[in-house]
Image: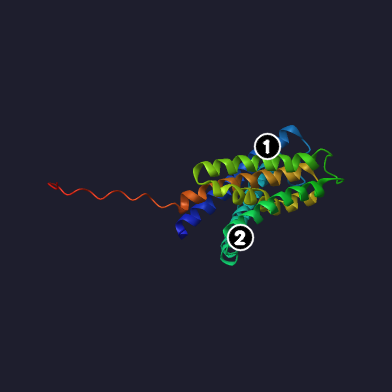
Amino acid sequence: MNLRKWMTLFGTTILIGGLCSLVTGVVMLLCDSSFRVVKTEDWLFNIVMMALAGLSLGAFAHMGFFAYMMLNYIARSIIKRPYLWVALQGFIAAFVLVEIAYWTYGSAFPDALFWAAPLLLAVASIVVAWWKVKETTAGAWLPTLFFMIAVTTIEAVPGFRTEKWTSLLFTLVPLFVCNSFQIMRLHHILGKPKSKPAPVAAGAN
């Protein structure tokens, strides 16, 4: 990955974060007129702040993506058997889902969120992992699930701490979309073009 590709990925990610936050925020505002990003009744200012918050979430998602790439590189260098690192990622992903249920159970979140949040995150992550495997190899299953579940959850910790489902949704959805985009773009960025067969010389038998 060269600097130009990295900058393109970064710029696209933050734009996706801004757009996704804007759409999510407007939908939530239409469904709940009390939803606010900042404490003001000016809906236009709130919409602008939603987009700016989304740009920040996109940048945060890219930082998480870069951190995962570094972690993956270091882990593969230390753990000599690749399947152990892959299995560990699968275990951590499952543990994080249980941890989400633990965070939300008995909190100020709606009662149903303690099972709905991990379930929806798991289902959405499985869809992304299936898509990733379809475009790459079967070995991408667990690493993709780990990234989409564990890394996205770590990035969304501030949303969990608010104990408000609106804030959690506003944080989690853009992060998930940005991470989905990044993990699906990775193999396109790193992929090498197929070599073309050498042309046959004119008159050769």
Q: Mark 2 falls on what kind of element?
A: helix
Q: Earlier in the sequence, mark 2 or mark 1?
A: 1
Q: Which residue, given by chain and number where applicable, does mark 2 sit on?
A: 67
Residue lying furthest bottom: 78
Three-letter residue code for mark 2? Ala
Q: Mark 1 falls on what kind of element?
A: helix
Q: Position of residue 64 (x, y in %)?
A: 62, 56
Q: Which residue, given by chain and number where applicable, does mark 1 sit on?
A: 26
Q: Position of residue 183 (x, y in %)?
A: 56, 49
Pick the residue in front: 16 or 36. Answer: 16
Tell me the number on the disc at residue 168: none
Pick the residue in front: 143 or 193. Answer: 143
Q: What residue appears at the point 80 percent right and 42 percent down from the top-left corner?
A: 114
Q: What residue appears at the point 47 percent right and 52 percent down from the top-left corner?
A: 189
Mark 2: few/some/many CA within 10 Å (<14, 14-19, 20+): few
Pick the residue in front: 131 or 104. Answer: 131
Three-letter residue code for mark 1? Val
Q: Position of residue 137 (x, y in %)?
A: 51, 46
Q: Is residue 85 left or right of residue 169?
A: left
